[in-house]
Amino acid sequence: MKSRITFVRARHDSSQFEEVKAGATSIRIKSLTGAREERLTFSADELPQDEDTFLSMPTPSSPFTSSTASHCHERLPSLEHFAAYIRHSICPENDAECFMRADHLQQADYLDVDYDAISRSLVLTTFHRHPPGSERWDEDMQPHDSSAKTEVGILTPKKAADQEELSLEGFLAVVGEDQELIPPASGSTFLTTFLKPSGLHPTLRITFPSSSMDPPEPACALHSYLTLPSSLFVDKYQLSSPNLLASNNLHAIRALSGETDLEAPDWRIKQWGSLVLLELAVAPPVQRRLKTLWHADLPLHLRYLSPTARGESQVDVPWPVVFWACPAEEGTKMSANPFDRVHVGYDSLFGPRTMFYHFQPRPAINGGVLVEQLTVPVLELGGTRWVESGTVGVVCLGAAWVVWKLTRIFSRDRRADPGRFAKAKKTQ
């Protein structure tokens, strides 16, 4: 097993961590503020016997014709079961450090699982914005065993010489091998909410501080990339109106794929949902100087959902990704970055010479989870029998009313002209 642990200190954090000590068998980090990424690489012989079952993944249809990658979205609120699998199937018996790493998976901000069929190796990558239950990292890293190799990096962002570069400074070291280490010498945000009351046509609002909306370059465009579950959809015909787009501070829909049927109920939808790439309008310079809030509103529509016992259903909607997309200048070298996660979403919709500058989400409630929840009224299962019997009753009453009206008309005509009916009878 190979392990690579990377700490990236926050750009706006001016504090210095207390110390980094390297010894013959360990590296100790104390009071470090920042993010942590850990990448574990397992060879085929280190994986459990049920590897094939564990690695088989469903292959959905590609949502964008311009992308060769496959996409699937399903909310996973907890990694508890996956962590338990690691503890019982991968961790050696009585290995306390492996157990601790598995437990930390439950607090990870994201988890990537990659399998290389050629080399038959499994790569697990976890990312933590901050330590579980703390504000600073305190770790004593030791080699797992004689065959394991652990690399540690402590990096700090610095101003890049060229615009397209991501520059970091710090050091990289191998636990148990490097013993002399030298320690290294607020961005734009957004908030996502649903306007109240939401009803069956909720409006998703993205809020920015107007003072943070200065584009990095004049040619940059502000975009939002949304992952919508099957219970929600965007009406592309509604959003083709320039007046509606302008009134909601939207510019245009740049890409829409997945389930876009405007009439089908949720139980008839075969795919998991849809993907939407929007270009947003930018606050004018005058409003940016006023330091007010700028809103972009996206009208959505709910499908008919399946009945429930409580008469209501909950819909979980992930927060969008918000970013500037800027064309690179002529002659700019777009070098590869080992930390990039490419072709996992919106980046496949832009050209290879596009630079992205991201807005940071700032959740106000819900424990920092980047998911908005909608409570939707649906048919209550206990009331379905009344609907059925009521429908039959209404149909019967309607039929009886029609017969009664026809009978009254026939009787009235007969009383008004009895001779006509008698003559008709005699003729017969």
Image (spheres, rainbow, N blue to C red):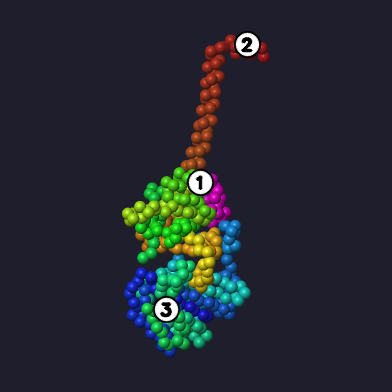
Could you say whether the residue bearing mark 1 is in a helix, strand or loop? helix
**Picture layout, residue 358 above or below residue 95:** above
| The C terminus lies in quadrant | top right
Q: CB of mark 3 within 8 Å of CB of mark 1?
A: no
**Which is more toward the observer, 380 or 249?**
249
Three-letter residue code for mark 2 = Lys
Residue at position x 58%, y 63% in the image: 69
**Which is more toward the observer, 232 or 358?**
358
Could you say whether the residue bearing mark 3 is in a helix, strand or loop? strand
Which class describes the residues within 10 Å of circle 2: few (<14), some (14-19), or many (20+)? few
Which class describes the residues within 10 Å of circle 3: few (<14), some (14-19), or many (20+)? some
Mark 2 lies on residue:
423
Can see residue 269?
yes
Mark 3 lies on residue:
170
**Picture layout, residue 25 above or below residue 368:** below
Q: N-terminal of the two: label 2 or label 3?
A: 3
The x and y percentages for residue 299 are 45, 48
Q: Is residue 427 left or right of residue 200?
A: right
**Which is more toward the observer, 326 or 321?**
326
Q: Residue furthest right?
A: 428
Mark 1 lies on residue:
240
Three-letter residue code for mark 1 = Ser
Q: Is residue 369 left or right of residue 410?
A: left
